[in-house]
Image (cartoon, rainbow, N blue to C red):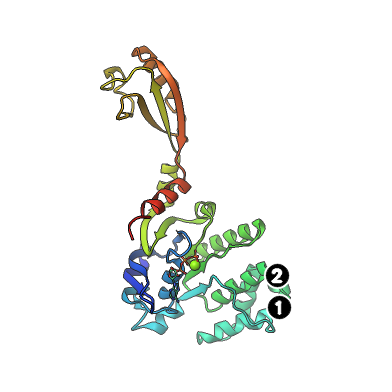
Amino acid sequence: MTSILTITNLQKTYAGGFQALKGINLDIEQGEIIALLGPNGAGKTTLISTVCGITTASAGQVRVAGFDIVTDFRAARALIGLVPQEIHLEPFETVQNTVRFSRGLFGKKSDPAKIQDILQQLSLWDKRNSQIRELSGGMKRRVLIAKALAHEPRVLFLDEPTAGVDVELRKDMWDIVAQLKRGGVTIVLTTHYIEEAEAIADRVGVIAKGELLLIENKASLMKRMGKKELSVQIADPIAALPDSLSGYDLELSSDGRALIYRYDTRAKRTGITALLADVAAAGLALADVETRQSSLEDIFVDLVQSEGGTS
Ligand SMILES: Nc1ncnc2c1ncn2[C@@H]1O[C@H](COP(=O)(O)OP(=O)(O)OP(=O)(O)O)[C@@H](O)[C@H]1O
Ligand SMILES: [Mg+2]
């Protein structure tokens, strides 16, 4: 696969001296959907704004399909579409003109059929002659997407596309993203909804305090999420695991009072029944059992909190 976007040691220090990006490295392949998670103020919008050339980087490099966003700005920018976090639209302009104008800004030849396609894809065709001020909030979000697609970008950045939208529009947005992916568009989106990342991303990245803490294939994250931990507490502490239990993936707690067993909730057999029988057969008296599931949310919260004291 070929990289469409390469971000190398990207740093951003704002005029007041605040370091919002502390050396981000990220390689994105064509056709991928990347979801970036992170708390408020983590640097997600700064990252997107810098890549899109709205904010200038303090250090580092960004290439879009090989074009440097500084030295080849025009070529790089033409390949990028941006749906900003804030809605800024001209209230008295019509939907159709708003989208058409956006295409023109990139020096692309007028193409009414393409604009019609985009408006239909976003269920805005019926509203094409409405003024922006006559639209609902959700429709305005769709117009922002239509605008970002008007010049047929190859990489689309969506900065919290579903913040404050209803469940139906959120699902529509997911469908739109899937459809764009099928058309070969690469998508980078930010979200505060973990289930959104689960639903549509190929890879999930976590940003906190200007650093990319994790970027991982969703499938492997889901695998981690699917893990459950069973803690078998025993009445009398032991110094080592009995040999008869060596066939299990077990860990003895440091106080010798609990056997920690990790299993895959998706597996046909969890092995719990056999384990408990073998624990009893080993002569260990059960005091209690407890289970705990790690979720993407846990992973996210742990990551973000463990960064808490570092800066
Ligand atoms: N123009 C600016 N000047 C100075 N500091 C800024 C500017 N824009 C953003 N920041 C600071 O940079 C940090 C990152 O902000 P950013 O908007 O990138 O966060 P975010 O991850 O998008 O957060 P949210 O989830 O709230 O949208 C914040 O501390 C913010 O106050
Ligand atoms: Mg933001």
Residue 117 spot, x, y in % from top left: 62, 73
Could you say which quadrant of the image residue 10 lies in?
bottom left
Displayed quadrant of residue 280 = top left
Indicate which quadrant contains ligand 1.
bottom left
Kind of residue sitting beneath label 1: Arg
Q: How many marks?
A: 2
The kind of residue on which mark 2 rests is Ser
The answer to whether the residues at label 1 and label 2 have Cβ atoms under 8 Å apart is no
**In the visual, does 148 lie left or right of 96?**
left
Label 1 to label 2, Cα distance in Å?
8 Å
Which residue in the structure is indicated by mark 1? 133
* Residue beneath disc 2: 136
| 290 is higher (above) or lower (below) than 199 | above
Where is residue 278 shown, x and y percent of the image? Answer: 37, 16
Q: Residue at 37% x, 72% y: name it.
A: 18
Identify the disc placed on residue 215.
none
